[in-house]
Amino acid sequence: MDWLWTFPHMDDTHLRMLRSTIDDSFRSFTRAWGDPIQALFEPLRILLVWMEWIMLATPWPIIILAVAALAWAASRRWPIVIGSVLTLLLIGYFDMWEDTMRTISMIIVCTLISLVVGIPVGIAMARSGRVRGVISPILDVMQTLPSFVYLIPVVMLMGIGRVPGLIAVVIYAIPPIIRLTDLGIRLVNKEVLEASDAFGSSSWQKLVNVQLPLAMPTIMTGINQTIMMALAMVVIASMIGVQGLGQPVLRAINNQYFTMGIFNGLAIVGIAIIFDRISQAFGQRLQRHKEHGHA
């Protein structure tokens, strides 16, 4: 009677044949298109190398002053400025400065790519229900698929290195900016849009002068979430060659170096808190500006 409790499944021979066919097809695709795809993403490698060079070549006092100025410009709050400066000083004191700069350069490049790709896609989703119907399931898969799974095709296509890690981080981090751009534009007050139409605004003028400015607090929340998810991916991306704070954490896991893992993990947390506080404070300032503008 055991057959009654056995779930119906494909015959093992057919299953092996199916897997073998798919694997062989992907290997053939990789051999045929791997080099052209790598060449296509070469500008991203150059951008990342350039950003790393800037971050590593800039003297640490200038970096700290720049972060302090950014924190003040975004928040106008001294606790955020002082906390950001102290965090960076502690990172430098514990000899994690270079890895931190590499991680920050990776996050900056990933965030820029996510914005350049994600905001237009979010705008297209807000303007077309058909586009939203196509993109939303893709975003659902991107957000629920374990990151280790989509590392496999990326590494098979492009090998180990910076660019595969960059692509993996962007895939993991881009959904929030797309979703929240779409949401922010759709939540813009209909009366404001009708007033804009009454003044004869074109579709482009309405988007640039009305919808995007009013949606900016929501978009800033999406940017914040994208940065946080990119930082969360740093350790996993270190498995395929991404340099930065993730590699010492990975070494600590492999070799049971407790203090190395804790210190570098705390450095990642510190960087995440700095980015989070600055972006959140800027989003809150935009929200207050928006509310005063409506008042």
Image (cartoon, rainbow, N blue to C red):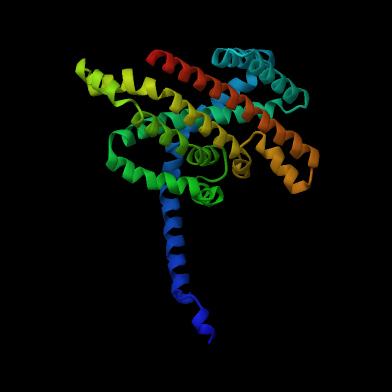
- For residue 89, side relative to residue 10 (left or right): right
The x and y percentages for residue 290 are: 42, 17
Q: Is residue 46 visible?
A: no
Res 118 quadrant in image: top left
Front-most of 4 and 84? Answer: 4
Which residue shows up at 33% across the image and 41% down it?
132
Which residue shows up at 61% across the image and 22% down it?
55
Quadrant of the snapshot with the C terminus:
top left
Residue 252 vs 183, above or below: the answer is below
Res 248 quadrant in image: top right
Q: Residue furthest bottom?
A: 1
The x and y percentages for residue 35 are: 45, 44
Residue 66 vs 179, above or below: the answer is above
Front-most of 176 and 114? Answer: 176
Which residue shows up at 50% across the image and 27% down it?
47
The x and y percentages for residue 251 are: 72, 43
- For residue 279, side relative to residue 99 (left or right): left
The x and y percentages for residue 3 are: 51, 83
Residue 272 vs 251, above or below: the answer is above
Front-most of 74 and 230? Answer: 74
* Number of numbered discs on residues: 0
Res 63 quadrant in image: top right
Q: Is residue 175 visible?
A: yes
Residue 46 vs 165, above or below: the answer is above
